[in-house]
Image: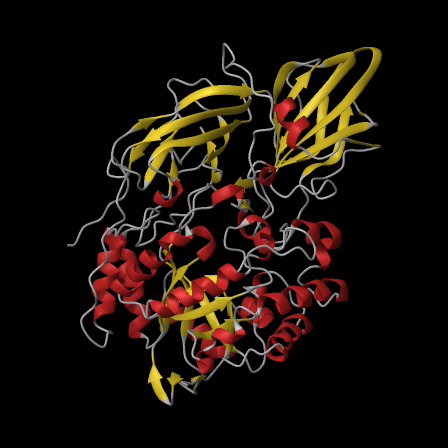
Amino acid sequence: MSEFAVGDTDFLLDGRPVRLLSGALHYFRVHEEQWAHRLAMLRAMGLNCVETYVPWNLHEPRPGSFQDVQALGRFLDAAREAGLWALVRPGPYICAEWENGGLPHWLTGELGARVRTRDEGFLRHVERWFRHLLHEIVPRQLDRGGPVIMVQVENEYGSYGSDRVYPRRLADLLRAEGVTVPLFTSDGPEDHMLTGGSVEGVLATANFGSHARVAFETLRRHRPTGPLMCMEFWCGWFDHWGAEHVVRDPGDAADALREILECGASVNLYMAHGGTNFAGWAGANRGGGALHDGTLEPDVTSYDYDAPIDEYGRPTEKFWRFRSVLAAYADGPLPEPPPTPAPLGSPATVDLTGWAPLSAVLDTLGGPESEHPVPPTFEELDVDRGLVRYSVDVPGPRQPYPLTVRGLRDLAVVYVDGSPAGVLTEDEAQLKEPVAGPARVELWVESLGRVNYGPRSGERKGITGGVLHERQYLHGVRARGLRLDALDAGVDSVPFRALPAIGAPGLYRGTVTVRGAGDARLELPGWTRGFVWLNGFNLGRYWSIGPQQSLYVPGPVLREGVNEVWVLELQEPSPTSPPSLRGLEEGGSEGGAP
């Protein structure tokens, strides 16, 4: 068996210097039937390695209840089959613009700021998770015939904390559970980050998007020896709902990549292929400058990242620029890119045939309703992704007063005595019209994604403060939650009725007949905000505020002939036409060889 080691100046494979040319590709953001194609695209770009995170919350949705952890093992097997080494970043925190940075909602709800520290309660959960997860990693290490050559300890810990005991405990745990390949950390190239995130005896790497020489000079001040590596070369960036689409000039990105390699360093392209935040797993950030403590900025469903391989798996101009740079470091001619997966044969319109109001969906698929003195959080109701209906009475008789929600996370559609009264957000938390008593107030609150980075990561969702009428708290709050995954198993039990005369929130049901199943995009003109399932597969969140205008539909999700469609609309749509499927050749970021 081969041995991979960290030398004084280079990575060593069986004692010979080797450079890692890696690309980030997250198995959980790509349909499994498309893994082989995307991995082959990495090889064609000139890479010899793939990197992936592991999202804890995806695989342990409830304490001790594990779901398809084996997906990681299958992905690593696919990487080996593709002729790629693998870097695994198991966290427990991953950031990754992923819901809660990968930490389970039940964990942060229970422990709050004690996560990502030496707290024994937190570490007990981590130990249970790692012992389960490492069954997929340890047997697939290079020295056992597998592709895994390195494993990361935590993730950018220096951007968050300074508990030096905690990452050391994680490194010791990985070793105790059988990880024999080298360990590494990754942090921004700043003194406080490298000081807080590095672990003695563990390779330190840096994350940046430009100015490689300056970044590596900073890294060398902390680690005079060891191979240089940019563990995250940010060759693109991610998008937020309501903001502009972010792109990076391909020539500028290629020049930055060339500078990294001219420094003699190894590199991991972040992202090589971003994929998609299916099923509402997109995270959120906090604006407000360096403190990351300002306005909530939820991430869009697409994780295209302006990567060299776009969301649909197609080569972009950046792909060809990078391939040209990387070819100079290859042992021989690079393989040609595999054919792009076949697109949808012809456009198809969704025929919506039934509708159920949100209240009927909640009554059928939601959790139990409970009464509380103050509003319970999503975490207390065991809602990870989804929404909660809060109901509270305004006593009366009393004159109209302002109604305000304190600590709203993140968006509430409000009804007073059954009539729409407005949409509230964290920054606009007071109804425009005052409310007189007596009145029944319903607030349908949606989480737009838990914060994945910065000091406010792990914060709770829902109404975290209270509901005020004038300055008086309203007590006796009834709450009922609806998890998104409650719809995954099917909606046959929901009492559907005829379509409403005008657009209304609720669950819409219909079909789309496909001829020539293949990769597609779903358009919802005039629909406001919600989620779409196609044959039971949750494509993710749509939102009319953009910048994302359609949802990616992986070809393997579709089948020839009739396909079932569910649209969960959470506001009031004004559809200008029915939802429809279009082929990817109609728009997109298709690239070509220079």
**Coloration of the structure image:** secondary structure
Q: Residue at x 46, y 81 (%)?
A: 144
Q: In this rendered view, identify the residue nearer to me: 402 or 359.
A: 359
Q: Quadrant of residue 14?
A: bottom left
Q: Residue at x 21, y 66 (%)?
A: 335
Q: Quadrant of residue 506?
A: top right
> Is residue 185 placed above or below 553 in the rendered structure?
below
Q: Quadrant of residue 156?
A: bottom right
- Report if residue 269 is visible in the image: yes
Instruction: From the viewer's perspective, tell me whether residue 416 is left or right of residue 302.
Output: right
> Is residue 237 placed above or below 482 in the rendered structure?
below
Residue 6 screen position, x and y as percent = 45, 83
> Is residue 463 placed above or below 323 in the rendered structure?
above
Quarter containing the C terminus: bottom left
Quarter containing the N terminus: bottom left
Q: Residue at x 41, y 76 (%)?
A: 228
Q: Residue at x 31, y 39 (%)?
A: 517
Q: Residue furthest left?
A: 594
Residue 119 screen position, x and y as percent = 74, 65
Q: In this rendered view, identify the residue nearer to me: 275 or 256.
A: 275
Residue 330 screen position, x and y as percent = 24, 74
